[in-house]
Image (cartoon, helix red, strand yellow):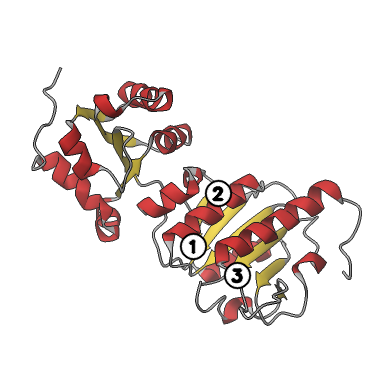
Amino acid sequence: MPEPITSRQNARVKEAVKLRSARQRTKQGRFLIDGAREILRALAANIRPLEAFVCTTLCTTDEAQQAAEKVRESTALVADVTTEVFEKLCFGQRTEGMVVVAETPTRNLDQLHLPPHALVAVLQGLEKPGNVGAILRTADGAGFDAILLADSNTDLFNPNTIRASLGTVFAPNVCTATTAETIQKLTQWQLPIFAARPDATRLYTQADYRTGAAIVLGNEATGVTEAFQKEPTQGIHLPMHGIADSLNVSATAAILFYEAERQRTTSPGVAPPGY
């Protein structure tokens, strides 16, 4: 059995730490996964682990021990590390005793196979990885069939995205594309497109999501671009009764996604009011 890594200056450790940088993730085609739950969900989604750093003394929960066992059974090169070395590797306050280096998977539109009347979330130009992760988690909970990041300003496997998504980012129905590619594919799928816009006249409850829809959310500061402000896109808005003109994008996503889920599960034969 190899000796555990005890030096924070170890070459493998230093190379892994570089992957906290988006530039290095893109350059190397690899990224880091922190947390037992996230690691288990990545493995279940067939994300390929390349290396793993395990601090056995910190793997105290059943979930952490299960993740460590699964990683050791995989083809990943596993190294045991001391607590001090793990502190250099881990993200934030993650103390579950394991960090995995994984191969960045290919996620593109042509790989998606949607059911009839699909629900699709489109996140255009979002910049904050925490918002992206929170929306991915919400879309997963609301049963969306695909989540498309159009012209994203953050990479999909940013540590904050992974953490905020609780590992739902690893699902094969999450992919990136350009805005033009996204609109072309939505048109091909023949899905009505609804974009959240403060200046829209139609309430979000007046849109009909029952036979499938794409719901578009724009950049935190500037909203959706012109591409989603013209036909066939239809604008929808949430009522705002205070001095703010909009909600945080992740809060907006939660309201819209669960309205779509509500319509499809509780009122399948009744059109929304005013539609």
Instruction: Give the foreground label among 2 and 3.
Output: 3
Residue type for callout 1:
Ala
Up-down: is 97 above or below 69? Answer: below
Percent of width and height locating residue 181: 54, 66
Residue under the image location 42 percent in, 22 percent down: 62
- Kindly tell me whether residue 220 is visible in this rendering: yes
Residue type for callout 2:
Arg
Neighbour tally class for label 3: few under 14, some 14-19, many 20 plus, Cα within 10 Å:
few
Label count reads: 3
Neighbour tally class for label 1: few under 14, some 14-19, many 20 plus, Cα within 10 Å:
some
Percent of width and height locating residue 110: 54, 53
On screen, residue 24 versus residue 67, left or right, reads left
Identify the disc placed on residue 137: 2
C-alpha distance separating marks 3 and 1: 25 Å
**Nearer the N terminus, badge 3 or badge 1?**
1
Residue type for callout 3:
Leu
C-alpha distance separating marks 1 and 2: 20 Å
Q: Quadrant of residue 80?
A: top left
On screen, residue 223 versus residue 268, left or right, reads left
Instruction: Give the foreground label among 3 and 1.
Output: 3
Mark 2 lies on a secondary structure that is helix
Answer whether labels 1 and 2 touch (C-beta < 8 Å).
no
**Nearer the N terminus, badge 2 or badge 3?**
2
Which residue is identified by label 1?
177
Which residue is identified by label 3?
247
Up-down: is 232 above or below 139? Answer: below
On screen, residue 262 versus residue 161, left or right, reads right
Residue under the image location 31 percent in, 23 percent down: 72
Percent of width and height locating residue 184: 60, 67
